[in-house]
Image (spheres, rainbow, N blue to C red):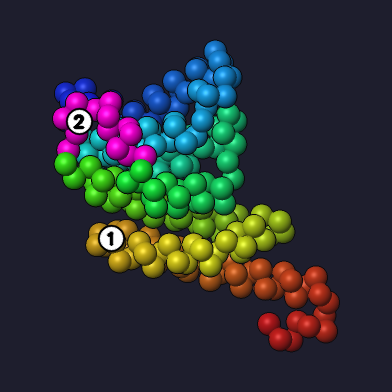
C-alpha cells in the first residue's frame, strides 16, 4: 500500500476498507502489544493508504472517505469518542508536515506534492466525519452528557469548518459543511432548552 502509483494500489476496490477492518480485528485477536496499537502510528499510515485508495477508486471513495475516523478509531482497541477523534484529526492535519516525511521515507519515489495532496485528503475526511457526527447526534435526538460533550467543543468545530470552507471548492463538500452548520445550530438550541428545563419553569420564558 505504501508504494506510490503501484499497480496494487490501482486495483483496490470498494472492499478495501472492509478488508482493512477485518485485518485489524484479526491482528487484535493475535496481539495486544501497546506499540502495535499506537494510534499516532496506525492512523497516519492508514490515511496515507486511504488517500491512495481514493485516488485509485474515485467512484468508491467519495461517500466513504472517513472510514478510518468513523470505524477504525471506534474499534475496541482504540475506543475513541467523536470528540477525541475530532481533536486527533485537527492535530494530525496541523502537523502533517512533521509526520508525513517520516512515513514517506518508506515510500519509493514519493510524489513531490505529497504534503498538499495529504492535506486536501484529510480535509475531505474531516468534512465527512463532521457531517456523520453531527447528523448522527441530531438524528438520534441526543441529550444529556453526550450533547454536553459536543457543545463543549462546538466552537472549535465551527473554526475548523471556516478553515475547510476556504480550503475546499467541491460543491458536495460545501453542501456537507452547510449541513454540519445547520446540525450544530440545532444541537446548541437543544442544549439551551435542556439547561432551561433543568433550571426550572421560571427561566423557560427567556429561551
Quarter of the image where one finds residue 167: bottom left
- The magenta stretch spans residue 102: yes
- Helix, strand or loop at mark 1: loop
The magenta span reads 99-111
Location of the N terminus by quadrant is top left
Task: Tell me what residue is drawn at x 67 percent, y 73 percent.
Answer: 192
Measuring from the top left, give residue 37's x and y in whole percent: 52, 27
Residue 128 visible in rendering: no
Q: Is residue 2 left or right of residue 91?
A: left
Q: Where is mark 1, residue-wise?
A: 168
Location of the C terminus by quadrant is bottom right
Q: Which residue occupies the foreground of this view, 181 or 37?
A: 37
Q: Where is mark 2, residue-wise?
A: 4
Task: Tell me what residue is drawn at x 60 percent, y 70 percent.
Answer: 188
Task: Tell me what residue is drawn at x 58 percent, y 19 percent.
Answer: 32
Measuring from the top left, give residue 57's x and y in whole percent: 23, 36
Query: With respect to residue 23, does 153 lie above or below?
Result: below
User: Can you tell which of label 1 and label 2 is closer to the viewer?
Assistant: 2
Task: Tell me what residue is drawn at x 66 percent, y 68 percent.
Answer: 191
First in residue order: circle 1 vs circle 2: 2
Q: Which residue occupies the foreground of this view, 1 or 21?
A: 1
- Helix, strand or loop at mark 2: loop
Mark 2 crowdedness (10 Å alpha carbons): few <14, some 14-19, many ≥20: some
Amino acid at each position: 500500500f505504501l508504494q506510490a502509483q503501484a499497480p496494487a494500489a490501482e486495483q483496490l476496490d470498494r472492499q478495501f476498507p472492509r478488508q482493512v477492518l477485518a485485518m485489524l480485528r484479526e491482528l487484535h485477536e493475535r496481539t495486544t502489544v501497546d506499540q502495535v496499537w499506537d494510534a499516532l502510528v496506525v492512523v497516519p499510515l492508514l490515511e496515507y493508504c486511504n488517500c491512495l485508495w481514493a485516488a485509485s477508486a474515485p467512484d468508491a471513495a467519495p461517500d466513504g472517505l472517513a472510514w478510518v475516523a468513523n470505524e477504525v478509531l471506534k474499534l475496541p482497541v482504540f475506543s475513541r469518542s467523536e470528540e477525541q477523534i475530532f481533536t486527533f484529526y485537527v492535530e494530525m492535519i496541523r502537523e502533517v508536515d512533521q509526520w508525513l516525511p517520516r512515513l514517506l521515507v518508506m515510500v519509493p519515489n514519493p510524489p513531490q506534492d505529497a504534503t498538499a495532496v495529504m492535506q486536501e485528503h484529510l480535509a475531505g475526511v474531516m468534512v465527512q466525519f463532521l457531517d456523520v457526527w453531527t447528523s448522527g447526534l441530531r438524528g438520534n435526538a441526543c441529550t444529556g452528557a453526550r450533547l454536553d460533550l459536543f457543545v463543549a467543543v462546538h466552537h472549535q468545530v465551527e473554526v475548523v469548518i471556516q478553515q475547510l470552507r476556504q480550503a475546499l471548492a467541491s460543491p458536495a463538500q460545501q453542501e456537507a459543511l452547510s449541513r454540519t452548520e445547520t446540525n450544530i445550530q440545532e444541537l446548541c438550541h437543544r442544549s439551551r432548552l435542556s439547561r432551561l428545563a433543568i433550571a426550572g419553569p421560571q427561566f423557560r420564558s427567556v429561551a
